[in-house]
Image: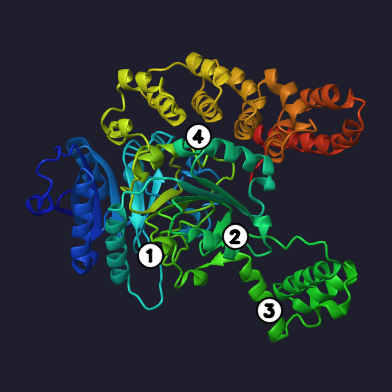
Amino acid sequence: MKRFVTILLISFSILQAGLLNAKPAKRAVAIVVDKATYDNCKNSIDGFAGSVMTDGLVPIIMVDKWGVPDSLRAELYKLYVEKNLEGAVFIGNIPVPMIRNGQHLSTAFKMDQRRAWEDSSIPSDRFYDDFDLKFEYIKRDSVHTLFHYYNLSDDSPHRINCDIYSARIKPPVVPGKNSYELINEYLDKAVREKGIKRGITDVSYFAGHGYNSNCMVSRADERVTLIEQFNIFREGKGKLNYIDFTFDDYVKQRLMAELSREDLDLAILHHHGSEDAQLLNGSPITNSANIWLDLTKKFFRGKIRNAEDTAASKKYYVENYSVPESWVENAFNPEVMKKDSLDDASMDINIPDMYGYKSNVPVILIDACFNGSFHLDDYISGHYIFNEGKTVVVKANSVNTLQDTWTNQLIGLMDLGVSVGNWAKGQMTLESHLIGDPTFRYTSSRTDLNWLDEALVLKKSDEKLWRKAMKDSNPELKSLAMKMLFFAGKITTDELLTIQRGESRPTVRLQAFYLINKKDNPNLVASIRAGLYDNYELIRRFAAKEASTNLSPELIDDVFKIRYAPGTSKRVEFQLNGGCETYSKVEALKAFERVVESKSEQWYNNKSADKKRLLYTLDRAEKEFAALLDPEVVLS
């Protein structure tokens, strides 16, 4: 394989100057760069490697001359075995594995693979950082030559468990600058920011329009758990900000100003997205009839403009919705079109908004769809690190992602000095990626836990260490210890269920629930039932999701009871609705009768009207399943 990849070791005699008294490095980081980028950015890459060494890691520069993903993967695996490789950074034009037949490993991406391959495949660096996964090479894209298509093999493990972390440093399109200038500037910034050694005292989180059904219960509970996850907030110090899309008709300016604050340490952004935009607002919320009329006129103008036959579209809305023709007669007036376009653009952060913008929060977590599409020439998350501000790393998704995910799982580890890469590698899905420097880390709020970052790499199976960590007062450390013991096979689901039922801190309960529900075991139903009645919304939501796929007869009354309870939050109701519609028709209707029709309150009387819709859905599902199991039926 070495004929494909040239490995250049940094000149340690130079980079170790001033570090002669430091402990020998036990872990390595691969800095993978294409030859053209290395030739144009050598000094900055060498400087970045020096900063990696300063952090106690061995930097290994790999110059990729051939661009073959299999070769890079083989070299990374060799370093993992021989050099305790903990992560890899891909700088410049490094081949992009495009994964097919693996949509079940993504959270939300489901597309007919008969469509264009560049659209129906998932760009994923799990190819490089999860060595257990098995792939079958298909071909290289003839147009997008960095794209290499792979099938996930049938005999591959069908779960993700990253052995190392990985990150991309790939410039987007920035007017007036070429990719080499951008990479040089970014690497110099990464070195500079890493040298500041800042802690976490100031955190902001944001929720955009339509995210998690606009459920304010989920946002309120998120605040409670963020306070739990960071030491400074538990002490009643620091600053935790929340911004909601409802704060402004056009919240973009507020959010961009917040992310530009030099004293903001971490930002968590919940919203929808695309490759080139962060989708923040919906239509303005107003009590003014005039504004509603203006919004309605704008809506119909947009529908007509986007129609294939604009005249027929106009006629349809005039006749079927009684829209006065005067409302839409100016749909193609240039000034009106310009104003409508500007109003639409004002709702979101678009790539042009990033030109000249300085984001200063070091780490941004974005759980939106497509914002991390690093395989494209231009993608919005890249603009956050390739600007003159202080942002050094973003976590984002290359394709669409599920809303109901645990974005903040173990996020407090970063407060304990764990690098962004070592934190993220335990939370990766097929589509999630780090953009920027994964070796960046904050100073620990607990100096007695400075061993933690190294232990995640070198002591993964040390039962004595993690058993002791479980007794620590920090909830994130206890949660991490449970996770490490679980994957080492050294904690039972019986013990985890006891923790889930008895632990006072919600993130620890959620960690126990999360682990119990990782695989089949006798405690699944008990864990789900306990989760459905937990006081933490995210546990209830995840339990609702699991109950709706588990479909145990023991849970049917719980599913219907909570689905139709007046105090059930929006997203829990959303998840349980699917469960109600997936049980057998006979049992579902009996449960509906027991839970809804047996009640006398007006709320339940109103809900009785749902029976007609439920019956329709159950009948249709029954027919579809019968057709699916009938060998005589031809499925399209």
Task: Look at the numbered discs 3 and 4 and tell me whether their residues touch, using CB distance below 8 Å.
Answer: no
Q: Is residue 64 above or below residue 596?
A: below
Q: Which residue is mark 4?
A: 234
The Cα atoms of the two marked residues, 1 and 2, are separated by: 21 Å
Q: Image check: 573 left or right of 534?
A: right
Q: Is residue 462 above or below residue 53?
A: above
Nearer the camera: disc 3 or disc 4: 4
Q: Image check: 429 left or right of 536?
A: left
Give whichever of discs 1 and 4 has the lower sequence position: 4
Query: Which sits in the foreground, 140 or 595?
Result: 595
Task: Look at the numbered discs 1 and 2 and tell me whether their residues touch, using CB distance below 8 Å.
Answer: no
Q: For the residue labelled by badge 3, is the local secondary structure a helix, a strand or a loop?
A: helix
Q: For the residue labelled by badge 2, is the local secondary structure a helix, a strand or a loop?
A: strand
Nearer the camera: disc 1 or disc 2: 1
Mark 1 surroundings within 10 Å by alpha-carbon count, few (fewer than 14), some (14 through 19), many (20 or more) = many
Task: Please state the horizontal and vertical placement of residue 495, each as a whole percent of the image.
Answer: 48, 15
Q: Which mark is residue 339?
A: 3
Q: Which residue is mark 1?
A: 386
The Cα atoms of the two marked residues, 2 and 4, are separated by: 32 Å
Q: Which residue is mark 2?
A: 279
Mark 2 residue type? Leu
Task: Please state the horizontal and vertical placement of residue 343, each as a whole percent of the image.
Answer: 67, 72
Mark 4 residue type? Arg
Mark 1 residue type? Phe
